Structures are given as structure tokens and as C-alpha cells.
Image (cartoon, coloured by chain):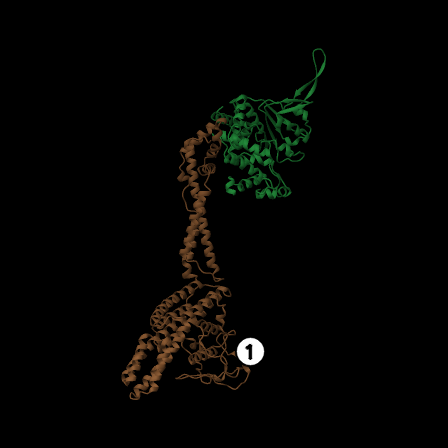
Chain colours: A green, B brown
Amino acid sequence: MTPEEFATTFERIRTEVRKVIVGHETLIDHVLIAFVAGGHVLLEGVPGLGKTLLVKTLARALELSFSRIQFTPDLMPADIIGTNVVMQDAEGRRYFEFQRGPVFTHVLLADEINRATPKTQSALLEAMQEHAVTAAGTSYVLDEPFFVLATQNPIEMEGTYPLPEAQLDRFLFKVKAEFPAAGDLVEIIDRTTTAEQPQAQVVATRETIRQMLRLAREVEVASHVKEYVARLVRATHPEDPHSANMARRFVRYGASPRGVQALILSAKVRALVAGRVNVSLGDLRALALPSLRHRIILNFEGEAEGIDPDAVIQNVLDETPELEEARA
Amino acid sequence: MTVLPDALRHLVGRAARRLTWHRALRGGLLAGGIVLAAIVGAALLSMIVPLDLVPLTTAAGAAVAAIVVVSGLLILLRPTDGLAAARLLDIRAGLEERMSTAFEVGPRARHSALGARLLADAAVRAESIDLRATFPWKFPRSVYVIAALILTLALWPSTLRGLTVPGTAARRTQQAIRQEGGRLEQFARALQSRTRSQRMPQTRRVAPQMRDLGARLQQERLDRAEALARIAELSRQIEEARRELSNRLDAQRPGPREGGVPDDLLRRQALEQQIRQLRELTSRLRQNPEAVSPDALQHLGEITQEGQGDQPAQVRNRLDRAREQLERGDASGAGESLAEALRELEGLESMLADAEGLQSAQQQLERSRQGIATGGRTPAREFAEDPSRPQERGGAPGERALTEEPGAEGRPPEGPHEGTTPGRGRVQEKMGEPSPRLEARRTPDRLRGAQSEGAVRSAEVHGAGRPGSSRVGVRQVSPTIVAQADRAMEAARTPGRYRALVRRYFERLARLR
């Protein structure tokens, strides 16, 4: 696959998704970038914003399998991964057979993930990180591509189990779904309340997606761009000598090394989409918020002041020079 | 080895050179600005402490030197490397890190799946870049700062020069300048008054300049450097006049010169005595040309013998001729010869007086220079004579008045300028009760010694002197000793009239010998 084919394919996928989803351009771009980068997305937004539709449309456009799990407090890990069930063969002998759970899919929608218990949430950890699950001592490799889009409702926090930092860190992006504008709402009415509803067409195959995943990792990154990412992430840590002002005041612990990986990987995809074969500083700045916002743990003062991690990241971007020479 | 397309390599190379020059210029201008700021800071500091203002040309030269040196060093020692240039090129030209990534990937482009594509992309972009637009030559802000600093230094002499903060060392120096200006003016007045009564052409020319300098030191707002420069300039002119006069005197000196100023002083005193004797002899011959007594012949012989070391050869010839004429009984011819000799001796005496006047003017300038240079803290300042006082006029060269005011003999002389009001009050008022020595009462004695012809004035000393005559024989001392004594007396914490009295005493002793 050439960079041009990559960009064309990406654009076609985006066009197909946009045929179904009204508005949310940034959200769609971020979800697609995370998908092509091989990461997972935590989507935060109120119900009814078209999250399920987005994932369904994506799966349809790419001809991928799709599963949806509604997380509830009584959901068990086996409900996600699957379980061994007793089977009986023709001769009447009984044996265990692994019954695959909904995680065995290409695109998984984990709806309201924070409503399940931590035990159940952690069942997704191995699947998300290793693209494999283990049941009764046997590991089962998930089929590629494997993409998890988890959602959580920022309003109804009663009876929820906030995701632990370790699990949050496994999401490439945390994307916020904003409420549609008035014009978008009208468009939603037109598209969804008529006899004919738009349907996404298949524009890429699984093999195409795998090639895109491989090509994205071939994109070149200059040393000073990598250093900039490293400085950005270090600047989120309050104990760092070059930390940003807000990070020193409101952050308990900054972004992890996975933040660096997430930022570079997603920036590579964005560079290819933009027709470049190298990562630019602009790519990093554009993707810093979704890549880092869920990796920053505020301290008590930050929580009490109601500080948004986005403000901290913006402050980090403002105070971190693009070139080390500029700081010297 | 960097495998870069030619267009890319040339572009980055040119950008690196351009950036090197930019940085060198900025660094140089910054250094120049720092130098000028330091000089302006020193000028501001001169309002508090007496610092000499750096001339504008020197300041500008220092700034230019700093700019050149720092720029040169930056160009030689810290050239911009290609990678840094590529990174800045990316930022300035909006290349989204294409150049810098290509520059880094170049050496390993063959091993990168997208390396060739990256280099080609960067090369295409490089062709459309105009370095002049990307890195335009523009003067940094330090240029305006430098211009402002130079303007400040240029306007400083005419606006802020000499401004001082009250109560600071700079203000004290300024006061010292004004005081010295007053002293110079007073001294010059005395010198001028003397040139009216005596023929001292060079001194007459110098005195108004000195008076003008004194007035300017008092009136104009000068800093120490400027005041010292003006004093030095006048001192140089006087030195030239002295040298010229000294050459003329040396030409008329019968023998080799042995000493400096004290030698001239003794010579002048001897000449004065010879002139007085010649005048008397001439007067006697005119009054009674017939009476050519052996006494007159002997007198003339003594004059000739005494003046052997001082008289020019021409004068001695005339005196010899007058003696021969007297021996022949030609009194009128001898009178004419003596009159001619007298005129020549008077001319010589006038030159010596002129030299002495110039020397005293130069010494006064030197004292003022020291007073200003040290901010008026030298001991000389403490016992310097007050121009406002009548006895200050006695400080002028040739003035040897011991008593000028009627009845002044009976009271103690005024003391130096102690107290908070300089030049006011008397010793008792300023220094408290008189010391026991001054309070001692003894029978006033006149100074002993043979008085020379002509008017002689003396003063009574009310003090505890030692009665009796000196048992040390009178003998000639070296001119160095005389000069040392002169300096010691000038520096002594003694009222001017006492000093004049002592000087007069020893001059008489010299004449006795």
C-alpha cells in the first residue's frame, strides 16, 4: 500500500461514516485514527449521540464483525470472554467446549463500561492489550483487527465504577462526544425519520485495514519531534523540572509512557492522512488532547477546583517549546 | 554519509550559513548594547561617585569592537549545523518537519520503507522555498536600544553632564572643582595685579587665561575629567611658555646651570641686589660726575665680582668698560655704560620674574589639579589660602608683604580655614582657646641681621622663641634643600604671614653671605 492509497482509503471510510453520522467530524476522525493506529477509544458522552451507530457503521464500511456489550453491575467476565460449557458428543460422552463471548469480534462496543464491576472491567484488559483472552488456562487469540470502543456517561455517576487508571491507560484515545448543533439536529431528523435511511457501503476489506496498520508504523519521525513528545509528557508530571505551571499545581501523576506511544502512533496515522510520510509537530499538537487527557490524574486541589485535564494539557502545550534549542 | 538530494542539501546549507550570520549579528549587537549600557550606567553612576565620563567616540568604538569581535567569534566558533537549520526552516517555512526528518532519514533512507518517498517530498518542497523570505534580514530590537544608548551618550555632555546627587562623593568633587576654580581666579587676579607693576609679558598673557579658567570652573557644570582636562591644557600652555623663557635665560647664563627653580630664585635675588647697587652708583655719578671716588671704584668692583655667576657676558663687559672709564675719570661715559648695564640687568630680572610668575601659576594649577583629582581631600586643600582674604594676595609670586594692615602686628595672625564657614573668623574663634605657646609673653624682639639697602619691613613675633643668636654658620646649601624647604613651608600648617616671615629671614641670610 502506498501513502496515497492509505489517504484515499481513509478518506473513503470517513465519507461512508459521515453519510450515516451527522456532525461529530472531529470525533469521527479521532475514532478512525485510533482504529487505524490499532488502538481503542473511550468515548465519553450522554446517551443518544449515535455512538452505537458510529461503531456499527464503521464495521459495515469495513466489512468487519461487530458486537455490543451493555455493561451492567451484574455482568460477569464470562459474559464478555466466554466460558467452557459441557457438551455431549454423539456417543454420549461429555466434554468441555469453550463458548466464545462477544469479545471475539473485530469491532466491540462496550456500552457504559463504568457500570460494570471492576472485576468485569478488567476482563477486557487482556483483550485490549494483548488482543487475546484466556479462559480456563487456555489463551485464545482475537482476530485482527480488534477495536474496542467503550462509552461512559459523564452525568449519571450514581452506582458506577470509575475505570481504574491501569485500564484507562489502555485506551489510545479518550474522545468527548459533544451535543450536536442545531443544524446537525435538523439533519439528524431528516436522515433518521424518513423511509430511506442512509447505509454505509463497504469500502475496504480486512486486508486493507491490516496494510494500513502496517504502513502507519513505517512513517518517519524526526528526533526533535520525538523529543518534543517526550518533553510534552514529562511536562505533565508535577515533579519534572520543566513541568507546566498547571501540572505543578493540579496534577498528582502525569501521563504514562503509553501516552508517548499513543501520541506518536496516532500522529503517524494523521500524517499519512494528510499526505505526509513524516510526523509533524502539528500532528502532535492536534492529537495531544485525546491521547493524554485520560492519562492525567488530578490531585485533590485539581479535583476541588474542578480543573479539566484538557486545560492542563493545553497549558503544557503552551509552555513546552517545540525545539529544545528554544528553551536553551 | 548523508544521501540527500542536491536541492535539499544546498537549501539546508544556505539556510545554515544565513542563520549563522543572523545569530552572529544578533550576538554582536547584544554585546555592543551591553557595552554601551555599561558605559551609560557608569555615566549615571557618575552622579553619585566621581567617575570620568567615557567620550562618545570611545564608547562608540568600544561598541563597534564588541560587535565585530563577538560576531566574528560566533561565526567561527558556533556555526549553525545543518540539522538545526533544517528544523528552523521547517518552522519558518511551514514545511511540517519535512526537511529535518529528511535530513535525519537521509543516511538510512534505503532501509526505510518510506525513506525515498520522504526525500523526494522534501526535495520538491525545497525548490519552492525562498530563503530571503524565510529568513529575512531584519535588525533585532537591540539596534534600537543601541541607538537610544548612543543618543543618550551624545546628549549627555550638553544635558546631564555634571549633575550630581546631593550628599554624594560626586557632589563633593563638584564642590571641590568650584572651590579650586575660586582659588585659581583669586590667584590669577593677584598675578594680574603684579603684572601691572612689573614687566612680565608671558605671565600677563597667562593670567587672564587662568582667571577665565577659574571662572569657568565655578560657573559651568563640569565633571572631574573635563575640569582636569582644562587645567591640563592651560598647564601645558604655561609649560611651553616656561620652556621658551628658560631657554632664553639659559642663553644669558654665564655658566652651566646647577639647579632648578631655587637656582633661579637665588639668581634673581642676586640680580635685584646688583640692580639696586647699580642704581645707587649711577645715581651718585649723575648727581656728582666729578667726584669719582675710590669708594665708587671699589663698589663697582664688588658688583662685578658678585655678579660673576649671574651676569651675562655683555653686562660684565659694560661694567668693565665703566670701570675703565671711571679710572680714566670719564664719569659721564661710565654713567652711560652703567645705565646700559642696568637696563640689561633689569631685562634679565624681568625675565626671571616672568619665569617665577609662570612657575607659581603652574604650581597653583597643579595644586588645583590635585585638589580636584582627590575630591578636595588632600592636606593641601586644608591649608590652602582663602582667596577672599587680603593675605591671599600675598600668596602671589613676589609678594613678600609681612604686614599690610595697620596695627596688625599686635594681634595673632588669622589661622587656616578650620570650622564650618571657610574663610571666616579668627584662630581663637575657630580653634578654641590659644595654646600655651601662643599665650606666652616675651619681650618682642626684632629679627636680628644686617638689613640690606632699601625699604625693609619686619614684624614682631609674639611667641615662645628661643632667645640668643644662632651658632650655626651661614653657608650656601644645595638648591634641592632650598626646594625642599619651599615645599615644606607651603605644605606646613602655618599661617601665611608666618611663612612669609620665615622665608624672608632665610632670604636675608642668603644675602648676608
Image-based side of A276 in relation to B206, left or right = right
Residue B417: give x, y in percent of width and height: 50, 74
Residue A285: give x, y in percent of width and height: 52, 36
**Residue B166 vertical position relative to residue A131 in the rendered view, above or below:** below
Say if residue B292 shows up in the picture.
yes
Residue B26: give x, y in percent of width and height: 44, 46
The number of numbered badges drawn on the structure is: 1
Q: Nearer the viewer, residue B85 or A183?
A: B85
Q: Amino acid at mark 1?
A: Gly
Image-based side of B512 in relation to A129, left or right = left
**Residue B158 vertical position relative to residue A6 in the rendered view, above or below:** below
**Quarter where residue B123 is shown:** top left
Secondary structure of the residue carrying tag 1 is: loop
> Mark 1 = which residue?
B432
Q: Residues within 10 Å of mark 1 (few under 14, many from 20)?
A: few
**Quarter where residue B296 is shown:** bottom left
Image-based side of B278 in relation to A43, left or right = left
Say if residue A178 shows up in the picture.
no
* Residue at figure coordinates x 42%, y 40% from the top left: B18
Chain identifier of the residue bearing label 1 in the image = B
